[in-house]
Every structure is written in C-alpha cells, then in structure tokens.
Image (cartoon, rainbow, N blue to C red):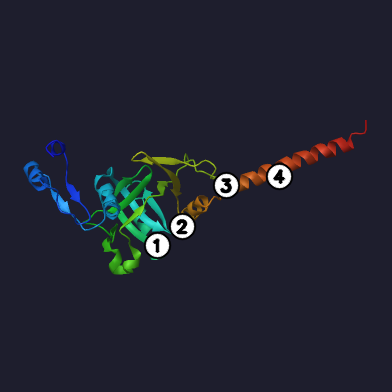
Amino acid sequence: LELFFSFPIPAVFVTKGQRFPSGLREAAAASGVPLIRTKLKTAEFYRRIKPVLEMEFAPTVSLHGSLADVFGVGLFFTGQSGIGKSECVLDLVERGHRLVADDLVITSRRGNDVLIGRGHEMSRHYMEIRGVGLIDIPAIFGIRAVRQQKRIEVVVKLEEWNQDSVAERTGLDVETTTILDVELPQITIFLNPGKNITVIAEVVALNHLLRYSGINSAEVLNEKLIGKMKLAARGNAREYLQEDHE
C-alpha cells in the first residue's frame, strides 16, 4: 500500500459495496487520497464515470460564434462581429430549430474527432440582438427552442460580399477548417441584399445529412455530365466514320 499511494493518485474507488481492505483507509488518509465506496458494479460504475471524466479533462477552447441544432445537425456560425450570426440563428429558432449557444461557444473535444459545444453557464440560452438587447430564448419561444449542448458538425462562415470574393459553385471542392485538431467541413456564405441566409443554412444541414447517408449531389451530377460527354464523343466519332466514304 505504501508503494501504491506513493504515486499521484487523485482518488480510490471501491465498487460493489465491498468493505475497504485492511489498512487501506489508514494509508489513504495518510496520503490525503479520497477513498470512495459505491454499490455499483465495476462495469456500471466505469460506464457512468467515463463521460464525466472525459468532459472534465477534455481539451477545451472558447470560440466566438453561434451554435444551433438544425435538423439534428450542429451548425456553428462564425464571422466578424455584427455580421448577423445571432440574427440568422434567431430566425432559425423561429422556424422551429434550437439554440445551443450564442456569442460565446465553449467547445470541448471528445475522443479523436468529436467536438461538443455548449454555452457559458451565465449567458446560456440568452441572445444579444443589436438594437434590441438581450433576449431570453426559452422564455419567448419555449423550452423546445433550446438544448444544453450539441456536436459541432459543420462550420458556416458568414462574409460580406465584394467583387474579389470567390464562391464555391459546384460543391465538389469541400473547404475545411480545424478546431482543436479536428477537421470540419466549412461552408462560406457571402452576404448581399435579398439573400435568405436562414433557408441556405437549412439546406446546408440537409445536404450534410445527405452526404452522411452516402449521397453527394455534386458528385452525382458530375458523374452524369462525364457520362453524357463520353456518349456524345462516341456518337460524334461514329457519325464521322459513317460519313467518310473514301
């Protein structure tokens, strides 16, 4: 026991409601190590404590943006201050989607490639709308309009449109960004008068679900076009040979 407690042990758990082995209580007290007993079986205790420890010790970063659950897809809206992230998410909430966090998104990495976003404890489920002020989303729209946390799956970057902006036209080339060493797809949406950002955000979420199910609309159309061009090329060659009477 002396050797065991010479290591930096944060706590010792005894499962199945078993009695502490002889000398364990005294050795733990001498080393200042908490000794905890539970009636749970070892496997069940491990299953319950594992996510708690993962969340507590996970790499974490605070990000500026807004996180919403749109059709079950976590969309993280980024962009310069005042560009309209909160207004877009507010419109999504009004259309039946759910707010996770606004302005400050606390992001933790679970495992190798899962990012979980949540709001700050003090400002959770509040939104700041310029010209209006702070609004309480569950008080206005009901508890259905919010959720405590959500996996971040797609980054939606809002940018002002200018003559030098280059927008993705086909969707074949997927832009990515990295958060806490996790690579995520990033969709850049350029803002100009008359563009319905809310509907576009919904389409981004639905398109992500479609890709997740194995259907890539851009690749399907590209394959159809390539097949059509191959058929046309064969037809042109056949017509040329038929007309060549020499």
Q: Which residue is most to the top?
A: 246
Closest to the observer: 166 or 194? 166
Query: What's the CA distance linking mark 4 and mark 1?
Result: 40 Å
In this figure, which residue is indicated by the disc labeled 4? 228
| Image quarter in which the C terminus is found | top right
How far apart in space, not on screen, are marks 1 and 2 (Cα)?
9 Å
Label 2 is placed on what type of residue? Glu
Mark 4 crowdedness (10 Å alpha carbons): few <14, some 14-19, many ≥20: few
Image location (x, y in percent) of residue 151: 37, 52
> How far apart are the alpha carbons under marks 3 and 4?
15 Å
N-terminal of the two: label 3 or label 4? 3
Going from N to C along the chain, the mark reached first, 2 or 4, is 2
Q: Residue at x 28, y 50 (%)?
A: 50
Q: CA distance from mark 2 to mark 3?
A: 17 Å
Check disc 2: other Cα within 10 Å, few if <14, some if 14-19, many if 20+: some
Mark number displayed over residue 97:
1
Q: Amino acid at mark 3?
A: Ala
Neighbourhood count class around disc 3 (C-alpha, 10 Å): few under 14, some 14–19, many 20 upward: few
Nearest to N terminus: mark 1 or mark 3? 1
The residue that appears at 79% across and 39% down in the rendered structure is 236
Is there a contact, CB below 8 Å, between mark 3 and mark 4?
Answer: no
Q: Are marks 1 and 2 in contact (CB under 8 Å)?
A: yes
Name which of mark 1 and mark 2 comes first in the sequence: 1
Question: In terms of sequence position, does the residue under pointer 4 or pointer 1 come before the other?
Answer: 1
Left/right of residue 165 with respect to residue 42 in the rendered view: right
Residue 102: % across, % down: 30, 55
Say above or below: 120 vs 236. below
Kind of residue sitting beneath label 4: Lys
Residue 224 place in picture, x, y as percent: 66, 46
Q: Give the residue at mark 2.
A: 202
- Toward the front, the furthest residue is 22
